[in-house]
Amino acid sequence: MKYIKKVGTYGAGIGLGALLAVGLGGCQQRTDEQAAAAQPQQKNAFVVIEEVKPGKYKVAEEFPAKETRIILKKLDGTEKVLTREEMDALIKKEEAKIENGTSPLTSPEGAQVAQQGGLSLGEAILASAAGAMIGSWIGSKLFNNPNYQKTRRAGYKTPTAYNRSVNSFKKGARTSASRSSSTRRSGFFGSSRSSTRSRSRSGFFGG
């Protein structure tokens, strides 16, 4: 009897240890989720850039998308989808101007330039949400620069277009975080039970 009691006590200890491990794992998972939520959300963007004057452009519309795509609307009414090679080449060209301090994006007068006349095509791309993904390698030179933030806002065709873009990406980030949290919550017991039932049905003879 004493042996059985010891085994029972030992088994209870294992059960408690397992529960503690699961509980700690859950706490760690919540901590990881909170840390992930604090990080900026990387998203793809569908962007429409419009030529407002010969060789000058503004962001007309943009919203989250499954893949980044930029549509260029020219003054003559024609439209073109920019290739990734074209985007990279334009941003590389702008990078040189940022490096030598001649880019309106980082200039104190940049917002006024963008407001009154528009930006070059490369500058307009970097002012859009797509620029944060395509030109990520120069992000540190832009995104912490207050002049860039002002110029970026002025680089949209209208204040409404800018506000609509900001709100759509915020909404997309909240939806993504909510969906991710819901998936994780259903994981440990919910999915394991369903997979167990599935295996029992399809078992030996089911395939």
Image (cartoon, helix red, strand yellow):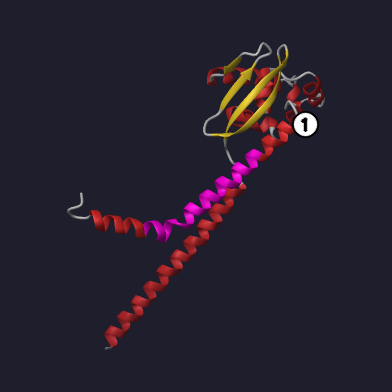
Q: Main secondary structure of the magenta part?
A: helix
Q: What amino acid does circle 1 point to?
A: Lys
Image height check: is 145 above or below 91?
below
Badge 1 is on which residue?
150
Tell me where residue 108 sits by quadrant: top right
Any part of residue 137 in sight: no
Residue 188 percent across, percent down from the top left: 42, 59
Instruction: Please state the extent of the stretch shown in magenta in the rendering.
Output: 168-192
Tell me where residue 48 sits by quadrant: top right
Is 178 in the magenta? yes
Residue 91 percent across, percent down from the top left: 62, 21
SS category of the residue bearing label 1: helix
Apparent side of residue 107 relative to residue 182 in the rendered image (left or right):
right
Residue drawn at (73%, 29%) of the image: 152
Is 109 in the magenta? no
Residue drawn at (42%, 73%) of the image: 16
Residue 166 percent across, percent down from the top left: 68, 38
Which one is in front, 38 or 102?
38
Residue drawn at (33%, 55%) of the image: 195
How many residues crowd mark 1 within 10 Å: few (<14), some (14–19), many (20+)? many
Which one is in front, 139 or 71?
71
Residue 134 percent across, percent down from the top left: 58, 27
